[in-house]
Image: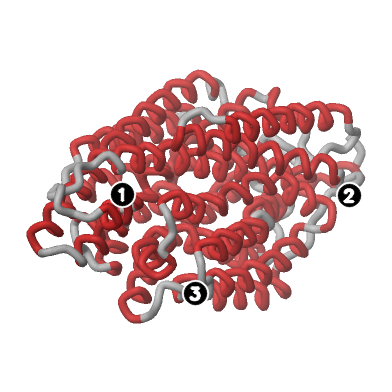
Amino acid sequence: MSQNVLAAKRTAIEPRPGRWLALSVLVLAVLLVAVDATVLGLATPFLSEDLRPSSTQLLWIGDVYSFVIAGLLVSMGSLGDRIGRKKLLLCGSVAFGAVSALNAYATSPEMMIVARALLGVAGATLMPATLALIRNLFHDPRERSLAIGIWGATASAGAAVGPVVGGFLLEHFWWGSVFLINLPVMAVLVLVGIRTLPESRDPDPGPWDLLSVALSLIGVVGVVYAVKETAAHGVHLDAATAGAVGALALMGFVRRQLRLPRPLLDMRLFQHRGFSGAVLADLLTVLGLSGLVFFLSQFFQLVQGREPLEAGLAELPAAVGAVLAGLVAGLVARRYSVRAVVSGGLAMVGCALAALTLLHTDTGYPLLGGALLAVGVGAGFSFTVTADVILSSVPKERAGSASAVSETAYELGAALGIAVLGSIVTGVYRDFAVPAEASGATTAEARESLGGAVEAAETLPPGTGARLLGAAQEAFVDGLRIAAGVGAAVLLATAVAAWFLLRGQRLADVAQE
């Protein structure tokens, strides 16, 4: 090897000055998205009281963000590879802050759904760019593992900060204030990021194929909508049509990527067994978790009567466990193996969800807190290591596309989880027995959501209202138990699959640029 080549290689793997300060800016973007996702659950009872959405509209408010972001992540990751990841991140951050204000001042369920969808467009620019920039900032694999652990830990910390700060705001201000907390974070991110973040892009990206962008968006949204509608209302023409259109669009997207000389997403990445196994593990893990987590905040507030701040603190063990696990996940995976850490983490989450099948309206906090801690530790190990595997499987020039695949799996799993598991909770809940003396209008309002049942109970005589609310709470918990059982089955099956798919996969110990 010539001296010039050796010198170029040494330059490529030389640690970049200021990389840790730049990382602090990237994790602010992660914090921005994580806080927004977690505060919605706490704000749901207040939002329901003010905007009075139907149960279907409430589910759309919860999952339309994930629908849109999942449909656009691959396209935005590829766009960052082309125009520059720093530019995309900073522009997306400004848009995210502006649309957060629109969410805060929504005046109807329809406006809230549109605002959440626009937030998904902005959010799709953030997550792939942060992971891709980490891939380019940290050339040493051990440093990169630690950086990814900090990145994941910050997302988990956002899950902790969101409910606590959101709970404080909800006790002192109106529900829209939980979205306005994004604005100062966004301002710091942009001002500091302009000075500290390096620009990076694919030096030979090719054109950004708009037809592929459209096929990706139509495909993901169509399939997820079909799953959501079928889970909620059974098979009907609209859902079947959306599913067929979505499936055809995804087939067209895959075929087009295989033909393009510079595709939005290199489908050949999936020939790498470790890459495919990591993506599948992420998708199914989030699917098993998200629907349950979406309703757990309502359980703490509307079933057990906790104040918003107390409910936020009650969910803290999951975030603490994820932070601690994420910081050491790379070291543990190198000491043992990738598949042991990922499969073990998934099994831990599955067992924690199985424990929640014992849930009752008066279940004590030790069971809930212990289950949440186990969920956090297991997810922290699994998500950190799979992100490392995905990023390490591709050249740094394609880091945006690879990061987008990882985030698409996460967001698609979240949307499917809320759609499927959330629909299980809603379906079981709607069948609860309403006291005969309650009026028809009151019955309809109570069956729409648990928040509606709380409001309906307040309009009835004390005895009747107590019976209606008690029946509604029992039905809600019945639905949670069934959803927890389904989630546990999904996670334990994923743990077994990951054990085989990640066989022989290792995290690198030396730079391989």
Residue 320 percent across, percent down from the top left: 35, 55
Q: CA distance from mark 1 to mark 3?
A: 33 Å
Judged from this view, the residue extending furthest toward the left is: 463
User: Viewer-proximal residue, 457 or 139?
Assistant: 457
Residue pictured at 37% horizontal, 54% vertical: 319
Q: Quadrant of residue 158?
A: bottom left
Mark 1 lies on residue: 447
From the viewer's perspective, is residue 267 above or below residue 312?
above
Q: Is residue 260 left or right of residue 387?
A: right
Residue 81 percent across, percent down from the top left: 80, 50
Check residue 203 in the rendering and tell me which mark sits there, or answer none. 2
Q: Is residue 118 left or right of residue 262?
A: left
Quadrant housing the C terminus = top right
Mark 3 lies on residue: 181
Residue pictured at 25% horizontal, 66% vertical: 310
Whether the residues at callouts 2 and 1 have beta carbons within 8 Å, the answer is no
User: Viewer-proximal residue, 27 or 125?
Assistant: 125
From the viewer's perspective, is residue 445 above or below residue 356?
below
User: Viewer-proximal residue, 112 or 500?
Assistant: 112
Whether the residues at callouts 3 and 2 have beta carbons within 8 Å, the answer is no
Amino acid type shown at disc 2: Pro
Quadrant housing the N terminus = top right
Amino acid type shown at disc 3: Ile
SS class of the residue under badge 1? helix
